[in-house]
Image (tube, grey):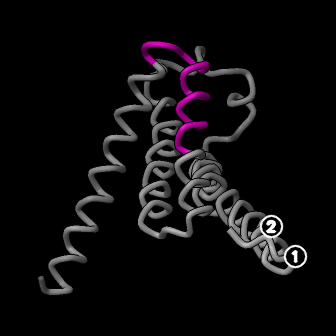
Amino acid sequence: MPKGLITALWLIWLAVIWFLSLVLHAMAFSMGGFEWLAILLGIFWLVYLVGLWLEESRITDTAWAMLLGYAIGCIRMLDTLPNEQEYVNWLRFIPKSILGQVALAFILIFVGVLPIIATNIIQSHKAKNRVLGRDD
């Protein structure tokens, strides 16, 4: 199979996973509220950590797509609020002019900062075990 076709199929896979995680986020919030959202985030993180532990980039890339869908789903929750009176208390204090930057920072935390921290922790743990002769 040509490499370009495999790359295209992989990108389609990631887009489908991203969309499905966005839909799962909406379903979890409508059915179980914030408790189910926390469980869903835990599942997505578990998939990411398994991919890191097994050193499989396909699993971690898929988990990144899930986390991106989750983060965008959290931002889309703001659209479900019909008016400003129903915003949660902390959101009222954020000026509308910087709401986009806050949303971008929220996405970067889930998709950028936390995965990098998890990668560093697992790599250092595995490196320490290799030095001590306890290679898996």
Is the N terminus in the top left, top right, bottom left or bottom right quadrant? Answer: bottom left
CA gap between label 1 and label 2 equals 11 Å
Seen in the picture, residue 62 relative to 85 is either above or below; the reply is: below
At x 50%, y 62%, the residue is 60
The residue type indicated by label 1 comes to Leu
Q: Nearer the viewer, residue 110 or 43?
A: 43
Seen in the picture, residue 3 relative to 10 is either above or below; the reply is: below
Q: Give coordinates of residue 119: x percent, y percent.
A: 68, 66
At x 54%, y 38%, the residue is 43
> What label does residue 75 carry, if any?
none
Seen in the picture, residue 119 relative to 22 is either above or below; the reply is: below
Residue extending furthest toward the front:
133
Seen in the picture, residue 92 relative to 125 is either above or below; the reply is: above
Is the C terminus in the top left, top right, bottom left or bottom right quadrant? Answer: bottom right
Q: Which residue is mark 1?
A: 132
Q: Which residue is mark 2?
A: 125
- Residue 47 lies left or right of residue 119; in this view the side is left
> Secondary structure beneath disc 1?
loop
Q: Main secondary structure of the magenta part?
A: helix
Q: Hey, which quadrant is residue 6 in on the image? A: bottom left
Query: The magenta stretch spans which residues?
Result: 30-44
The crowding category of the residue bearing disc 1, from other C-alpha atoms within 10 Å (few below 14, some 14 to 19, many at least 20), is: few
At x 65%, y 49%, the residue is 102
Residue extending furthest toward the right:
132
- Whether residue 31 appears in magenta in the rendering, the answer is yes
Q: Give coordinates of residue 45: x percent, y percent.
A: 59, 46
Q: Give coordinates of residue 20: x percent, y percent.
A: 32, 41
> Secondary structure beneath disc 2?
helix
Q: Nearer the viewer, residue 16 or 104?
A: 16
Q: Nearer the viewer, residue 102 or 18?
A: 18
Q: Hey, which quadrant is residue 59 in on the image? A: bottom left
